[in-house]
Image (cartoon, rainbow, N blue to C red):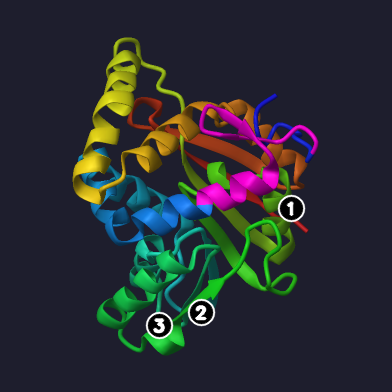
Amino acid sequence: MKAGDGATEREGADFGFERVSLDEKQGRVDSVFHSVARRYDVMNDLMSAGLHRAWKAQLVSMLRPPQGRPFAHLDVAGGTGDVAFRVLAAGGPKTRVTVLDINESMLRVGAERAREKVEGAGDRIAFVTGNAETLPLPDAAFDAYTIAFGIRNVPRIETALAEARRVLKPGGRFLCLEFSAVDIPLLDRIYDAYSFHVIPRIGARVAGDAESYRYLVESIRKFPSRGAFSGMIERAGFRHVTDRPLSGGIVAIHSGWKVS
């Protein structure tokens, strides 16, 4: 059974290709992102050849934050602010974003960048330390929830999905950008070779940490299929669930709505 496919605390969770307890996974994931926080966005550019920018632009395009009315947005596992800044740029002056991350090193990077990038940052964007499985936020508080490249690092994915639904207003939207399974022959083999042999070397050279990037590559392979993850979103109570593969299935954007 994969992590997120009904895993219980007794069964544990996948940390890359290794099986660990759920609590151990959380601690080890935290260590990974403490290690890479300062180089995280640079590494995203290098690893994806800049494609992550187009994927995130597509995510925000699907979100469509409004121009003329208040819009409360929650970005989970978004510590460095990359998605949040895009949402603020796309939305109107009444758009407000809360960035939540369990990792304070990532949040510090995001808060520093917000002061440089966002006019009136103190009023428009907030950085909150918290766990996706137990959001320290009220019920029905947000118009939309995004999580980009973060859900696969959550030990209890189903719990995080339930929390996402709880904090959304009726009519609110859940959007998740996550790595997926390449479905184009030959590209899948090229992608595997690049992932397992090149990305850890880039991590070692640029971030001084090959092991963290080896984990990130392995975690992609252990994440549920698009269909399985869509089923989890539906079981969490979301409706009109869809998934949209991008770049030959390297990533996918999953969408769901809180109808009531």
Expressed as whole percent of the image width and height from the top left, the position of residue 11 reads 76, 32
Left or right: residue 82 versus residue 65 is left
Q: Does the magenta-highlighted stretch encompass residue 27?
A: yes
Q: Work out whether mark 2 precedes mark 3 in sequence or the reverse, and give the earlier one.
A: 2
Q: Work out whether mark 2 precedes mark 1 in sequence or the reverse, and give the earlier one.
A: 2
Disc assigned to residue 93 = 3
Task: Please identify the residue farthest to the top as the structure is shown.
Answer: 185
Neighbours of disc 2 within 10 Å: few (<14), some (14-19), many (20+) = few
Q: Identify the residue under disc 1.
A: 162
What separation in Å lies between label 2 and label 1 (alpha carbons)? 27 Å
Q: Identify the residue under disc 2.
A: 69
Height in image: 32 above or below 100?
above
**Residue beneath the point at 44% across and 36% down:** 215
Q: Assign a secondary structure to mark 1.
A: helix
The amino acid type of the residue labelled 2 equals Arg
Please state which of the two labelled residues, at mark 2 or mark 3, is closer to the viewer: 3
Expressed as whole percent of the image width and height from the top left, the position of residue 124 reads 44, 83
Q: Quadrant of the N terminus?
A: top right
Disc assigned to residue 32 = none
**Residue beneath the point at 33% across and 53% down:** 57
Q: Can residue 229 be seen in this view?
A: yes
What separation in Å lies between label 3 and label 1 (alpha carbons)? 30 Å
Q: Residue 225 appears in which quarter of the rendering?
A: top right
The amino acid type of the residue labelled 1 equals Ala
Q: In which quarter of the image is the C terminus?
A: bottom right
The amino acid type of the residue labelled 3 equals Pro
**Which residues lie in the magenta part?**
10-29
Q: Nearer the viewer, residue 197 or 97?
A: 197
